[in-house]
Image (cartoon, rainbow, N blue to C red):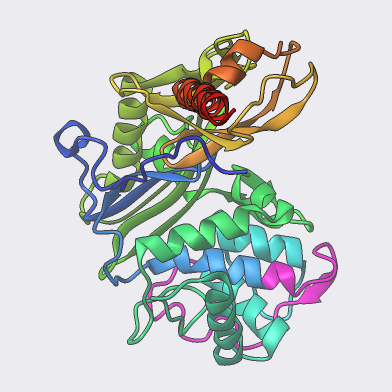
């Protein structure tokens, strides 16, 4: 078998598919990723190495979760947990050393109010020290494909050699959200500790109340802030059953939460400029085959489903159909014969595969078959003439001899 036609491979460059002027975001670094379609729809300086502040705690939390057997197990907050945190003006939940909490308390403390005491406690409990825990973080970074990242601490406090990129953070967030425990905590808005001593609220929820900003569209989040990193936000939003991951960093340090303002700008843009559209419709012509020796001139095959995606309103939809199967039909094939399959390709990705099965018998056409040998007719005529001519000449020659 061979393909009866081939798809022209083209380079689909996703650079700034969303108009920057239309977005007008404050953050210096950003990415918007369509999780459903595995597609980056917007990118801004996403491969630059930057300080990432408390977005670090995403890695801390997923590494901790993967090394904890029971998140509801009770543990003692290690002595040394709070060393230097007050002096560095780090965000803290308020866990006191020697107190008994659960791993769940510490994980919620790390992701919701972004407590450096929670991440330090997790690091010491799991690895004995923050330095040793950072080795686990860097090991995990390599395992999942983060190529431009290095961790020195568990909280994201600014220090030399602690860095990442927006591209790497996207890899991390995608990986972490596959873990149900992480996802549940990441999407939690508020939490009360197991001993009822601490009420925790996500930093996004707090900012929304403080600045009277709508944060209802932020399904999951982790914020970050240091003077080097600016305001950062790794967030999750859902539009028309399509999940987007939005990561921003480097927004101005001012009296406004520009990272959340940027999120709303992005949300409004997506909501206004995108919609659910049919990129593939049922009964669209996908393939035409022309049998060689059949009374049927052509056999057509059609799509059998509708596929809808959340895409830009003004996007030109282009579908390619790539056939892999029997090319030459002899003309005597029967209904139900499996000929091959068609790959339905959209933006260089196979979005559906159609089995190519004959829905009718083909009728062999003898005239078409014999027609291919038309050139034998004049040759046969000439040969016949020569033979007859030879016979006549031979008879004449014999008659003279007699």
Compared with 211, 386 (above or below) is above
**Residue 354 position by quadrant:** top right
Residue at 24% from the left image edge and 59% from the top image edge: 45
In the rendered image, residue 231, in percent from the top left (x then y), is placed at: 31, 56
Residue at 66% from the left image edge and 63% from the top image edge: 107
Compared with 203, 355 (above or below) is above
Asked if residue 317 lies left or right of residue 123, the reply is: left
Quadrant for the C terminus in the image: top right
Residue at 52% from the left image edge and 13% from the top image edge: 284
Say which of 120 and 37 sits in front. Answer: 37
Specify whether residue 70 is painted magenta. Answer: yes
The reply to whether residue 95 is in sight is no
Quadrant for the N terminus in the image: top right
Asked if residue 188 lies left or right of residue 228, the reply is: right
The furthest residue to the left: 21
Say which of 179 and 219 sits in front. Answer: 179
Residue at 53% from the left image edge and 40% from the top image edge: 3
The furthest residue to the front: 402
Range of magenta residues? 64-92
In the rendered image, residue 269, in percent from the top left (x then y), is placed at: 30, 28
The reply to whether residue 340 is in sight is yes
Asked if residue 192 lies left or right of residue 316, the reply is: right
Specify whether residue 206 is painted magenta. Answer: no
Say which of 383 and 232 sits in front. Answer: 383
In the rendered image, residue 313, in percent from the top left (x then y), is placed at: 33, 19
Dominant SS of magenta comes to loop
In the rendered image, residue 36, in percent from the top left (x then y), is placed at: 54, 38
């Amino acid at each position: 078998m061979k393909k009866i036609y081939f798809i022209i491979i083209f380079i689909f460059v996703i650079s700034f598919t969303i108009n920057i002027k239309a977005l007008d975001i404050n953050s210096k670094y950003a990415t918007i990723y369509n999780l459903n379609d595995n597609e980056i729809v917007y990118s801004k300086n996403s491969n630059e190495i930057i300080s990432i502040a408390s977005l670090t705690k995403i890695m801390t939390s997923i590494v901790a979760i993967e090394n904890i057997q029971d998140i509801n197990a009770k543990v003692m907050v290690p002595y040394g947990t709070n060393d230097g945190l007050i002096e560095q003006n780090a965000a803290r939940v308020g866990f006191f050393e020697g107190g008994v909490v659960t791993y769940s308390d510490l994980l919620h403390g790390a992701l919701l109010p972004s407590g450096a005491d929670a991440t330090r406690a997790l690091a010491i409990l799991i690895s004995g020290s923050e330095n040793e825990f950072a080795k686990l973080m860097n090991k995990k970074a390599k395992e999942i494909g983060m190529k431009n990242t290095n961790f020195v601490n568990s909280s994201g406090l600014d220090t030399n050699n602690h860095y990442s990129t927006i591209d790497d953070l996207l890899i991390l967030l995608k990986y972490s959200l596959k873990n149900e425990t992480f996802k549940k905590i990441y999407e939690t808005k508020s939490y009360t500790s197991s001993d009822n001593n601490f009420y925790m609220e996500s930093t996004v929820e707090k900012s929304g109340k403080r600045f009277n900003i709508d944060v209802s569209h932020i399904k999951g989040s982790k914020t970050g802030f240091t003077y080097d990193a600016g305001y950062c936000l790794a967030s999750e939003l859902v539009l028309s059953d399509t999940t987007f991951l939005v990561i921003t960093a480097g927004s101005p340090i001012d009296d406004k939460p520009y990272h959340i303002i940027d999120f709303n700008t992005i949300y409004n843009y997506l909501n206004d400029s995108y919609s659910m559209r049919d990129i593939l419709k049922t009964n669209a012509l996908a393939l035409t085959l022309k049998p060689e020796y059949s009374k049927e001139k052509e056999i057509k095959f059609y799509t059998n489903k509708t596929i809808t995606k959340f895409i830009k309103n003004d996007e030109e939809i282009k579908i390619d159909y790539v056939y892999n199967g029997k090319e030459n039909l002899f003309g005597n094939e029967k209904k139900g014969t499996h000929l091959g399959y068609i790959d339905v390709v959209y933006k260089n990705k196979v979005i559906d595969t159609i089995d190519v099965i004959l829905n009718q018998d083909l009728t062999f056409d003898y005239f078409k078959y014999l027609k291919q040998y038309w050139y034998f007719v004049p040759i046969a005529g000439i040969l016949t003439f020569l033979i007859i001519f030879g016979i006549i000449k031979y008879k004449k020659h014999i008659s003279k001899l007699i």
